[in-house]
Amino acid sequence: MSSTGSVTGSSGFGELLLLGKGSDLSSERGVSCTGELPPSSAPDLVERAEKARKDLGDRAMVLGHHYQRDEVIRFADITGDSFKLAQAAAERREAEFIIFCGVHFMAESADILTSSAQKVILPDLAAGCSMADMAAANQVDEAWKSLEKLGATQGTIPITYMNSSAAIKAFTGANGGAICTSSNAERAMRWAFEQGEKVLFLPDQHLGRNTAVLKLGLKLEECVLWNPWKPQGGLTELEIKAAKVILWRGHCSVHGRFSLANVEEVRAKVPGVQVLVHPECQYDVVKSADVVGSTEMIIKTVANSPAGSIWAVGTELNLVKRLAASNPDKKILFLDKTICYCSTMNRIDLPHLVWAMESLAAGKVVNQIKVADGIARDSKVALERMLALP
């Protein structure tokens, strides 16, 4: 990274430091890089997007996840995390089309919660989620059968993170479990222990471990890791029966990259910095952070902090950049020097959004996400159990 030049504002806060173009000698951190997302290729795309959105009117609602590009977020009617957006879709019964600018599992959740008359559209079908893909339905079924052979399913309650496929949500609903978000994982896990003696947590090992140990007070050794690529998850019968929580071997490819070394380095180089991370981060990172919270909580924490606050934020880069832009009186740093976008989230770009909206305006339904009735039924059971939690 270049060590010459700097990008500073009159206040000294809120400016984004460009890696390769400028530096903060006290931190050597920024929120941009030479691999910056390129602008839309066609100069008239914004104009076309505005026209298509106007043509669709109240027939459509555009949902934008916090990790989306700015060029997409500007056309979103509502921004939020995955569950907030799915709930918003369910409440907007008059909208014929729900254009979900997020990833596949989010669009599935929206389809499950909306009416049969509504159509959920994902502008790019390749926008998946690496974490959700780490728990395939056949793998989870095989794991449950292995646990059944050991008599370990009796009293085991599945808790599945929202970042999962509809098929995994359906498995959860059919087996007495509930869905959780990063903000209510503690309540969901406590509920599970009220129903049984053991929890199978899918698919994010880090959220499961952080919740069990740092929120519920369980010991690390009471949480075991199930590897779907190994017989019996790579665990002994004794380990499985002694465990309080069985964690699926999955993780977020963005949040999982932050390390304890990142935290220690930023503290050493930036006096007064506060570390703010998402609970999908590794256990050592979460344990050493000043504040841990969901995407919505991260936004509120920074917004409500006093002027002059310095934050090193461990979450997806599009959101960190937006936090910096909307809080110019504070200094916002990316926790890791190595910039990382969520590659699948960023597949939803302006060309795909324009194509989807223009197609719908012309009467052609494209990229509709439709969950099979049986899977939708059991998934909804698991989602409704979560909604019923205090």
Image (tube, helix red, strand yellow):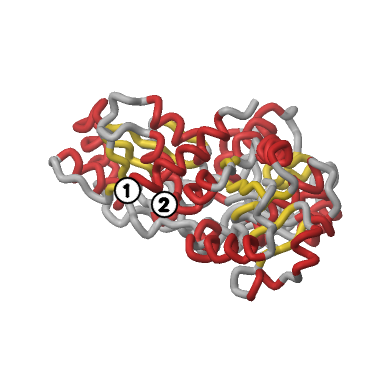
- CB under 8 Å between discs 1 and 2: yes
Q: Secondary structure at mark 2?
A: helix
User: Viewer-proximal residue, 70 or 55?
Assistant: 55
Q: Quadrant for residue 12, please give it.
A: top right
Badge 1, how many Cα within 10 Å: few under 14, some, many 20+?
many
The answer to which of marks 1 and 2 sits earlier in the sequence is 2
| Distance Cα–Cα, label 1 vs label 2 | 8 Å
Q: Residue at x 56, y 60 (%)?
A: 33
Q: Position of residue 351 (x, y in %)?
A: 29, 52
The kind of residue tagged 1 is Ile
Q: Residue at x 74, y 28 (%)?
A: 306
Q: Residue at x 51, y 63 (%)?
A: 35
Disc assigned to residue 104: 2
Q: Position of residue 192 (x, y in %)?
A: 68, 40
Q: Secondary structure at mark 1?
A: strand
User: Viewer-proximal residue, 215 or 4?
Assistant: 215
Q: Residue 347: in sight, yes or no? A: yes
* Tag 1 residue: 369
The kind of residue tagged 2 is His
Residue found farthest to the left: 362
